Image (tube, rainbow, N blue to C red):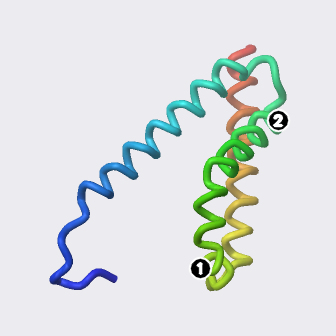
């Protein structure tokens, strides 16, 4: 938690937000371009794999902090539910666009 004497880090937060939005738009564009030719599960797997590869250096650098995360099993469960939701969304989107 930052102290009251710490300078505001709004620029850093804005940079993270813009980077996140750019990566989301990039991923959605690729999914839409490939959406009709590949199964939904494969698209979600590829999207998650690319995200993991992009984050792997950061995860490795801060590996001690990741190991000490409280409720690690709940974080893993959140990842599983997120993958299920993305797969279901892709499947419904594909069904609507082919109908």
- Mark 1 highlights which residue? 65
Disc tally is 2
**Residue 7, position as x, y percentages in the image:** 18, 72
CB within 8 Å, label 1 to label 2:
no
Q: Is residue 38 above or below residue 24?
A: above
Q: Residue at x 58, y 61 (%)?
A: 58
Q: Residue at x 50, y 32 (%)?
A: 25
**Residue 62, position as x, y percentages in the image:** 59, 72
Residue found at the far top of this picture: 99
Left/right of residue 91 with respect to residue 51 in the rendered view: right
Left/right of residue 2 with respect to residue 85 in the rendered view: left
Q: Is residue 97 above or below residue 67?
A: above
The crowd level at tag 2 (other Cα within 10 Å; few <14, some 14-19, many 20+) is few
Residue 88: quarter of image: top right
The mark nearer the N terminus, 1 or 2, is 2
- Callout 1 secondary element: helix
Q: Is residue 46 above or below residue 38?
A: below
The residues bearing labels 1 and 2 have C-alpha atoms spaced at a distance of 31 Å
**Residue 83, position as x, y percentages in the image:** 73, 51
**Residue 21, position as x, y percentages in the image:** 44, 41
Q: Residue at x 46, y 46 (%)?
A: 20
- Mark 2 highlights which residue? 42
- Callout 2 secondary element: helix
Closest to the observer, 7 or 38: 7
Residue 67: quarter of image: bottom right
Q: Residue at x 45, y 36 (%)?
A: 22
């Amino acid at each position: 938690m930052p102290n009251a004497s710490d300078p505001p880090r709004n620029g850093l937060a804005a940079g993270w937000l813009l980077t996140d939005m750019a990566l989301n738009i990039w991923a959605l564009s690729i999914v839409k371009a490939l959406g009709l030719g590949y199964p939904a599960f494969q698209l979600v797997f590829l999207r998650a794999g690319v995200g993991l590869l992009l984050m792997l250096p950061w995860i490795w650098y801060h590996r001690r902090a990741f190991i000490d995360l409280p409720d690690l099993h709940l974080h893993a469960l959140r990842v599983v539910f997120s993958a299920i939701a993305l797969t279901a969304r892709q499947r419904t989107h594909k069904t609507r666009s082919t109908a």
